[in-house]
Image: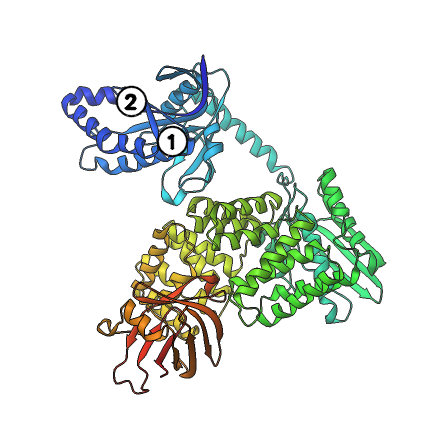
Amino acid sequence: MERRLTAILSADVVGYGRLMGEDEVGTLERLKACRRELVDPAIDRFHGRIIKLMGDGALVEFASVVDAVQCAAAIQRKMASRDDGLSDTKRIQFRIGINLGDVIVEGDDIYGDGVNIAARLEGMAEPGGICISGTAFDQVVHKIDVGFSALGEQKLKNIADPVRAYRVLLDPSQAGKVAAARRRPRRRGMILAALAVMLAAITAIFLAWQRPLAPNRPSIAVLPFANLSGDPAQDYFTDGVTDNLINDLVRVSDLRVIAKSSVFAYKRKPVVLADVARDLGARYAVEGSVQRTGDQVRVNAQLIDAANGDHLWANRFDRRAADVFAIQDEMSRQIAEALGVELTQSETERLSRPPTANLEAYDYYLRAEQAARTGRPSQLLEALALFEKAEALDPRFAEAFAADARATAYVWRSTFDDVLPSALARKRAYDKASRALTLDPDLSSPYSVLAVIQVVDRRYEEAIASARQAASLGPADDEAHMAVAYVQLFSGNHAEAAAAVETALDYEPNLSAIDQFTAGLISYLQRDYARATESFERARDGSPGNGLFVTPLAMAYVRAGRIDDARAAVAEGVRLLEGRESLAGWRLSFAHFRNEQDLRSILDALRDAGMPEWPFGFRGDERDRLDGDEIASAVMGKLLKGMTEPSGSPALMQIGRDGKAVFRSATQMTVETVVVRGDTLCEQGRDIFFGRADCGPVYRRAGSADETSYAYVNSSKVFYFSPVK
């Protein structure tokens, strides 16, 4: 007897007997056409094997349960509009059930509970709907563009044990969501349902007399500690105590800890705990102060129930500054104990392990973190120098290398070339992240950094693996979940990207501008334009005056029919970026979309909003455009002399016959390779857009006022030039 684990899809026609009774010939013809035009092609597309066809249904086997659910979703979505012209009494609708289970194989047929469960789930599905088992759900959740509604454990006919069941949500707006849902009670369950209602009412009355219970995972916000040293220069040390307490509590698996970006927004602001609870979704808050005098430090801290103001724990620590790690360890343990959380052995060991034994290195690290937290280029430059000092003093300081990698990656993604050129920032981020993981493989943030670099390099599977490892090691790390979101977005897995954003928001209610931008792109590609607009607006408001976060609004406005607003957003973005914004720039910057249609959808909307094709408003006459041979003749092996837009500053480009080239202007010098590709001239160098080729056309300029013979344009420059004789 042969057995195997397989995915089984069972489908039948709703009301088949009634349909046949009313119009036997018409029903058969419509059903045959439906199978021929829709069902069979879908099964073939998703690699299914038809086991048997009955008059009103089918049994299909798939090697992959992901393929099975995708096939079912494709069928049901198309069936929803197939018979729009017919009355409800004549429309053909399917119910579909899917299970992943063990089957008995006999020839071309399969038997057993694996098949029977699929058939029972089919009977539970709504007309036009899909119902799947828990074993199938566990394999497909967040892997396809559908949502799920949990139906709980179901007792199925002739199946010994209860089976977890889920209804598939086909509406695109529900993609990636997993909702708890109550089943519509059947007649045989009416009595039980009535009893459940009565029990719920009795429970509600009882609980009304009780103090509200804390959730299973207590949610806690560590508010910025106050600096009582009388010296503002000691802020970095006070912030470090707050920051490290957050990091310690995040490592406690039974706590939900609000991320540092959200809580640091309350620094030096009057705090109303009820507002904190509402805005951050935190039941508990930690407040405190730090006073550092000479080599002595005093830390006061208290744990408060934000719902009613009750103080659950308070303590004062008077120690030498050298004992700061011991203070943080004790605070973390005592707070967890006050919340009734029992630490595991590994958590206890992790909390008691100091990040470094070198206090001078730790001091530089705290100063660097404070500078990096501002996000300002001048402060980031200082932060990178301070991280290097910490690393030099303690070459085994893993957290310093990890923080260095995170800050450097931010510089790289934000294209802060005045802090560190793109190629150098990329290499530094990669090297520092790799070093951090060599020292401590359990850190999550270096994996986040590597994941982003890998997806930009189009190493999609590596990037997904790194991002998932980051989230696994840091389940409460919002940056890890946003790395998953970013990687899955550009890998084309929009539902999984959206789910990662929702998880990140659970820990970080106030995402950074760059993360709001990522969330906006995900919503846009899921066609949720209202939510995309909201995210893009938050990105713009979170980084005022930054044109990079103004223009994205245009694409959402276009899809929402707000053309005037879209054009205004493009105009403002072009103004803020001093004319550099263009479709060519977007096309090059986001060339790592795995799905070309995703990028095309973005570019089409921006084009409709009036974004120019080239920077600085350049437009060429196609009648003057050079072909590939003409470009090669004009530039290869030549010294090109001219000027660049928008300043009109002098520029030179020396191109060897082998394509080795140097471009120099008043503000730029790049060593690169130049090639003619088709009818475009392409520059490629490590300092040019992640090492990508930046290509553009060349035009003749007959009778130009400045006497230059040609104009060359790409995503970053307009260069008017003549070859030097």
- Judged left or right of residue 17, residue 664 is right
- Can residue 40 be seen at all in this image of the molecule? yes
Q: Amino acid at mark 2?
A: Gly
Q: Nearer the viewer, residue 414 or 151?
A: 414
- Residue drawn at x 15%, y 25% as measured from the top left: 26
**Residue 508 in view (yes/no):** no
Q: Crowding near pointer 1: few (<14 within 10 Å), some, many (20+)?
A: many
Mark nearest the camera among 2 and 1 is 1
Residue highlighted by disc 1 = 68
* 225 or 118: nearer the viewer: 118
Tag 2 secondary structure: strand
Residue 152 locus on image (x, y percent)? 49, 28
Q: Front-most of 159 and 422?
A: 422
Q: Quadrant of the N terminus?
A: top left
Judged left or right of residue 633, residue 542 is: right
Residue 322 image-quadrant placement:
bottom right
Q: Quadrant of residue 51?
A: top left
Q: Report which residue position mark 2 lands on.
A: 57
Residue 264: x and y in percent read 63, 60
Q: Is residue 556 above or below residue 137?
A: below
Point 39% across, 68% down: residue: 715
- Residue extending farthest to the top is 1
| Residue drawn at point x = 28 percent, y = 80 percent | 701
Is the residue 29 above or below the residue 274 in the image? Answer: above
| SS at mark 1 in the image | helix
Please tell me in which quadrant of the rendered image residue 58 appears. Answer: top left
Q: Residues within 10 Å of mark 2 (few under 14, many from 20)?
A: some
- Where residue 162 sits in the image (x, y, percent)? 50, 21
